[in-house]
Image (cartoon, helix red, strand yellow):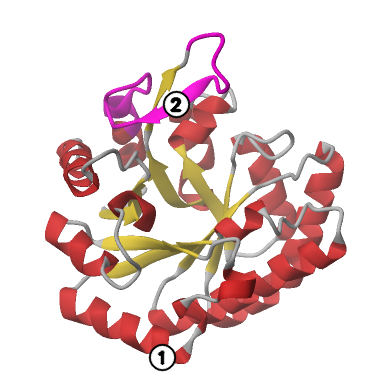
Amino acid sequence: MKFGVRVGMLKTTFEEAHEEAGKLGFDGVELEVGPNTPDEGTPLFDVKGRKALMERMKACGVATSCVCIGGFWKYSPAEADKALRDTGLDLLKKTIQACAEIGAECILTPLNNSGEEPDIAVGRWLEFLQEAKPVAEEHKITVALEPCARPGLGTPEEVMALVDKADSPYIRVYLDVANNRVAGSDSVEAIKTLGTKYLAHIHMKDLKENPPDSERPFSVVGLGEGMLDFPTICKTIVEVGYDGWLTLETPAVDDAKESAKKNLDILKAYF
């Protein structure tokens, strides 16, 4: 098993993330291409930026486990505006090419339905994946679809159906055990259902239920502080034969590095 951390959890800069993660005991960092990337750019899309990143990775021995395209929350493949969809496709293609160069084998693509009806959102996502998969297959980069509790795209069965229709070994699933619970599915059963055929990466975080009058029904908390059964989740991960990346997406809180180390130690203890 390899243990990663999202860059935002560390509350550090892009340039410092890998070194800080290595000091804390992580094997990799999950970087992000955010919604401002089309205008502001990102070191991942810059030749010098990628070269510097690879030098830092080599120096500290910490990989880039994955790159998340957070920009899909603005430029979703499900958007009604084709210009937004085209920007999202361009972001994905550029990220695939960057990942191939830096040695990151996976891209997290959050399944945002942009408020569209499920059939419309799923249809647009499928069209998007058909356009993207030749590039993913050429560079051998996995496009990992993360269910984010959105109608039509939130359950293991729904995302499996989308993967099957996309029909590529480089289009798989990024399971978030907490998102899965928000969608009303059992996280342990989701792991069993997806298995190694579909699972590409896994996000690890916990949830607590909020009071009835809260804006959101759940809040993200550290491992073991919420409602998820992590001993059974981790046992099931091993039982299905998964031996890839487990990436923390727990809250950064006040002392981000201390929080990251605490949650990493908790997670490692299960294995």
Instruction: Tell me: 122 left or right of 235.
Output: right
At label 2, counting other C-alpha atoms closer than 10 Å, the crowd grade (few under 14, some 14-19, many 20 or more) is: some
Q: Which numbered dot is residue 219?
A: 2
Residue depicted at x 20% and y 49%: 257
Q: Which residue is drawn at 62% across and 34% down?
A: 149
Vertical relation: 198 (above or below) 89: above
Q: Is residue 218 magenta?
A: yes
- Residue 32 in the image: x percent, y percent? 47, 62
Is residue 104 placed above or below 125 in the rendered structure?
below
* Viewer-nearest residue: 128 or 160: 128
Measuring from the top left, give residue 199's x and y in whole percent: 48, 49
Classify the position of the C terminus by image quarter: top left
Side of 122 relative to 191 (left or right):
right
Q: Which amino acid does label 2 sit on?
A: Ser
Q: Which residue lies furthest to the top in this view?
A: 212
Q: In this view, does 169 lie to the left or right of 254?
A: right
| Residue at the spot 50% in from the left edge and 75% down from the top edge | 42
Residue 16, horizontal then vertical, whole percent: 26, 69
Residue 185 picture quarter = top right
The picture quadrant where one finds residue 56 is: bottom left
Q: Where is residue 52 in the image (x, y as percent from the top left)?
A: 32, 86
Can I make out residue 144 in this image? no
Residue 199 is left or right of residue 73, and the answer is: left
**Residue sitting nearer the eye, 176 or 194:** 176
Residue 130 against residue 256 in the figure, above or below: below
User: What secondary structure prevails in the magenta region?
Assistant: loop
Please give the range of residues in magenta. 211-233
Residue 240 versus residue 83 in the image, above or below: above
Mark 2 to mark 1: distance in Å? 39 Å
| Location of mark 1 (residue) | 48
Q: 40 or 235: which is nearer to us?
A: 40
Amino acid type at mark 1 = Lys
